[in-house]
Amino acid sequence: MAQNVAIREIESPQTDAERILKTQREACRAAPYPALAARLHNLAKLETLLSENADAICQAIAADFGHRNPTETKLVEIFGSLTAIRDARKNLKKWMKPQRRHTSIMFFTGKNEVIPQPKGVIGIATPWNYPLYLSIGPVINALAAGNRCMVKLAANSQNLCILMQQLCSTTFTDELVAYLPGVSGSEFSALPFDHIVYTGSAESGKNVMSAAAQNLCPVTLELGGKSPTVICDDFDLREAASRIMYGKFVNAGQTCVAPDYLFVPTHKLNQFVDYSAEIIKARYPDTDRDDYTSVIDQRSYERLQDTLRDATEKGAVAVNLSNNDCNDTLRKIPPHIVHNVNDSMRIMQEEIFGPLLIVMPYSNIDEVLDHINKRDTPLAFYLFTHDKALQEKLFYNTLSGGVTVNNCIFHVLQHSIPFGGVGASGMGHYHGYEGFLEMSKLRPKFTFPKVGKPDLFYPPYRKSHELLYRTLNRLKL
């Protein structure tokens, strides 16, 4: 059962954020290294918060979108968040353990360790497309690493942000976790955090990084991009279409790791389009109904329509895969495949972030690699083949944030591997152990041996020091 929550009285959003940051910093100073038991307790409370308030969370997200099916939210956001918490609770004792490191023979009775310590207050800025999952993931890593955290959701996610502010203020108090309704992105990223995790567009990521630089604050950026997909000739075409249709059109394509453009063997293009239409009509017989998500706002809806119009006016073929046309009232654009494209089209120049899938024919895998490698490094790359040699060729001759082989998007749900971008798609990682490390200061500690002779290095320098240098160098220590 959902708990009753009291709304915390808020001053101006920015003043409130500054006050909470001060409160959290004082809490960090009072307890700079929370014990394992305290961290596990906080993670358990977060798990309970999500479990007991799942329906309310789904309602808030649906209100922010205009419509999103609550089952989709539970499967892609709440379940993923709960399993991430459970993974952290299971592994945290091991993660916190000091790492022993090799000590050279010069100091052979000494001791080298690397100890992960909390950084302090983590600022987390999250977009609207998966507002719960993309905020809770960094919160989990921050709490596991012993930090405090402040969370800013997008302006399009204010129903969820207000709900999470209420729930967290009741469950944790502002000293530990605080969601901040109403704070602008520029104000938030200018706060002197100890680390910022930002998920969103590349342009906004540059602004966050610039603002953070004024405070010498490290950043983790998850930025997206145009994620390519390749179907090789050996893979069952209908099964590939089935998996790609889910990865692309879940959340109406509003996913940072959604397939953006697809390469299919030339002789299979028409068959792929036919299979895709068959699959979409079966999964979404009426895209105006509940199972299909709305585009988040009018601006995005018009942008996607303009992108589609620009492509068709320049010669592209757009295939509506559903039984429906666009619904202006519900802001729903049916799944489309767009082929016969060229680089002059806007759809080829910008991340689509909606229910339009580019499909391009190819006859040689090297032309696929050439196309991918001439463009910015994407957040994800998907390849469909059972041929191990071909898998290795596609993997080692490209670069992306992450890869799923023989499916789409599911690498993001694996807690034992990191999630992060590279180049234009971001920097740093979170999720699992790597997320714990990202939110920690890996503090080196050397304990000098009891029998050591440090005075061998002390001045005034004599011939014996030169002899020591030559001897040590000759031994190649």
Image (cartoon, rainbow, N blue to C red):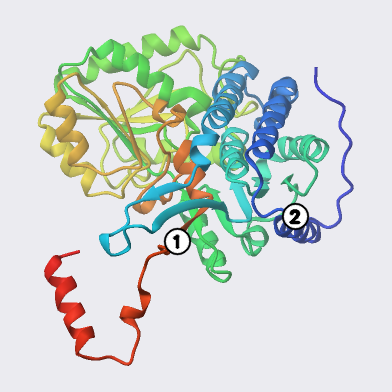
- Residue 216 x, y percent position in the rendering: 54, 68
When asked about the image quadrant of residue 69, the answer is top right
Residue type indicated by callout 2:
Ala
Quadrant of the frame with the N terminus: top right
Mark 2, Cα crowd under 10 Å, few <14 / some 14-19 / many 20+, is: some
Image quadrant holding the C terminus, namely bottom left
Q: Secondary structure at mark 2?
A: helix
In-image side of 259 versus 440 (left or right):
left
> 370 or 31, which lies in front?
31
Q: Which mark is residue 27?
A: 2
Residue appearing at x 83%, y 58% in the figure: 12
1 vs 2, front mark: 1
Q: Position of residue 263 (x, y in %)?
A: 23, 29
Q: CA distance from mark 1 to mark 2?
A: 30 Å
- Residue 447 is labelled as 1
Tell me whether the residue at label 1 lies in contact with that at label 2, contact meaning CB atoms closer than 8 angstroms.
Answer: no
Q: In the image, what residue occupies the spot 67% across and 49% down?
A: 148
